[in-house]
Image: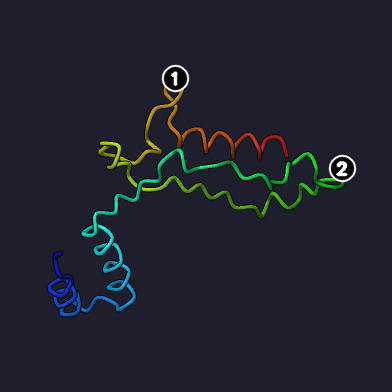
Amino acid sequence: MPSFEPCRTKMESEGIAQSAISAFESTFNSLVSGNTGLIPEDTIIPSPDLVKAESFAGDEVDTSLLSTTVVLKLNGGLGTGMGLDKAKSLLTIKGNDTFLDLTAKQVIAMREEY
């Protein structure tokens, strides 16, 4: 199995933070051990304990909170594992719209409604 030590030496000589070196070492060790990072689909089961939005108590919604709401969408990596050469958020999904366009349109619709 390849050694991480040459990487550590190079990173330390470049002044890389120890936390970054440790994170990279973990990923390095995972890679050289043959770990693909893939989760077999037959091992995935739905969560039985998800709360349905319809079950939330109360009919009153404080829409004034939306003016201070932040929308954060995490789409993962660049999709290189899927053979992509750009961010997945730039993929066209409907008409000429990308995932990024859809996110922006959702925020605009929310602002117009509230």
Q: Is residue 42 left or right of residue 52?
A: left
Total number of numbered labels?
Answer: 2
Q: Residue at x 14, y 65 (%)?
A: 2
Residue at 15% x, 80% y: name it. Answer: 13
Kindly identify the residue that appears in the image at 34 percent across and 51 percent down: 37
Q: CA distance from mark 2 to mark 1?
A: 36 Å
For the N terminus, the image quarter is bottom left
User: Secondary structure beneath disc 1?
Assistant: loop
Instruction: Indicate the position of residue 27 as horizontal and vertical percent values.
Output: 29, 62
Q: How is the image coloured?
A: rainbow
What's the residue type where badge 1 is placed?
A: Gly
In the picture, measured across the screen, residue 18 lies left or right of residue 101, that is left
**Quarter location, residue 46:** top right
- Which of 22 and 87 lies nearest the eye of the viewer? 22
| 102 shown above or below 10 | above
According to the picture, the residue beneath numbered tag 1 turns out to be 95
* Residue 25 appears left or right of 49: left
Closest to the camera, between mark 2 and mark 1, is 2
Alpha-carbon neighbours of circle 2 within 10 Å: few (<14), some, or many (≥20)?
A: few
Q: Residue at x 53, y 50 (%)?
A: 72
**Which of the marked residues, 2 or 1, is nearer the chain's N terminus?**
2
Residue 59: mark in rendering:
2
Mark 2 is on which residue type?
A: Asp
Identify the secondary structure beneath mark 2: loop
Name the spot of residue 100 as percent of width and height, x first. 45, 37
Query: Where, quadrant-wise, is the C terminus in this rendering?
Result: top right
